[in-house]
Amino acid sequence: MERSFLMVKPDGVQRGVIGEIVKRFEQKGFQLIGAKLIQMSKEQAELHYVEHTGKDFFERLVSFITSGPVFAMVWEGDQIIALSRTMIGKTSAVDAAPGTIRGDYAIHTNFNLIHGSDSPESAEREINNFFTEQGLVRYTKSI
Ligand code: CMP
């Protein structure tokens, strides 16, 4: 079973769309196995965005993601990495299609509400940056 790290960014928390975002992934059929509202440290943010180190928007990105609480989640399901990215929409606000989370809620690329892992390797690194294996809950759906 594939896992992905999904995170409602500070703008999404401020705008009160945690519930709407969780609803979309539940509705799709994915399983939530870990979640917490946290204030990221600068070190944690730099590790989360390590692939963007040195880019012109890196400092702004770290500053924004640490500007307020984020809602960090681990979800599980078949092909969740690719499917969740389709549901999230394109990074650029002008390219994010209506019906996607960013397409429905974001008007600026820097404030695009949600992060989703882009590969199994990124998902593992990102999950480990926020959760221990003991902090995740595996359970079987019985209803
Ligand atoms: P995300 O894909 O979650 O992670 C990197 C973030 O950097 C991205 O969302 C955008 O919010 C932000 N960003 C700002 N400028 C750019 C850019 N030119 N290219 C990619 N991401 C950018």
Image: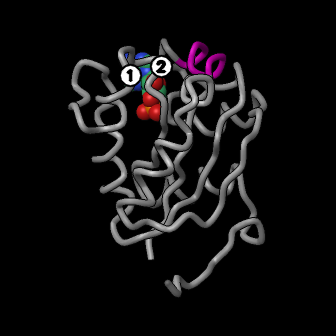
Image quarter where the N terminus lies is: bottom left
Q: Amino acid at mark 1?
A: Ala
The reply to whether dot 2 and dot 1 touch (C-beta < 8 Å) is yes
* Mark 2 Cα shell of 10 Å, populated few (<14), some (14-19), many (≥20): many
Q: Nearer the viewer, mark 2 or mark 1?
A: 1
Query: x, y (%) of residue 101?
Result: 36, 36
Relative to the observer, which residue lies in front, 53 or 124? 124
**Residue at the extreme front:** 143
Query: x, y (%) of residue 117?
Result: 46, 49
**Magenta region, main secondary structure:** helix
The residue that appears at 72% across and 57% down in the rendered structure is 131
Q: Magenta residues?
A: 58-64
- Give ligand 1's quarter of the image: top left
Q: Which residue is mark 1?
A: 106
Relative to the observer, which residue lies in front, 119 or 71? 71
Q: Amino acid at mark 2?
A: Phe
The residue that appears at 34% across and 47% down in the rendered structure is 85
Lower position in the chain sequence, tag 2 or tag 1: 1
Relative to residue 54, is residue 137 depicted above or below?
below
Q: Choose top left, top right, bottom left or bottom right for residue 94.
A: top left
Query: x, y (%) of residue 116?
Result: 45, 45
The residue that appears at 52% across and 34% down in the rendered structure is 17
Quote the CA–CA distance across marks 2 and 1.
7 Å
Q: Choose top left, top right, bottom left or bottom right for residue 128.
A: bottom right
Q: Which residue is mark 2?
A: 111
Relative to residue 26, is residue 62 depicted above or below?
above
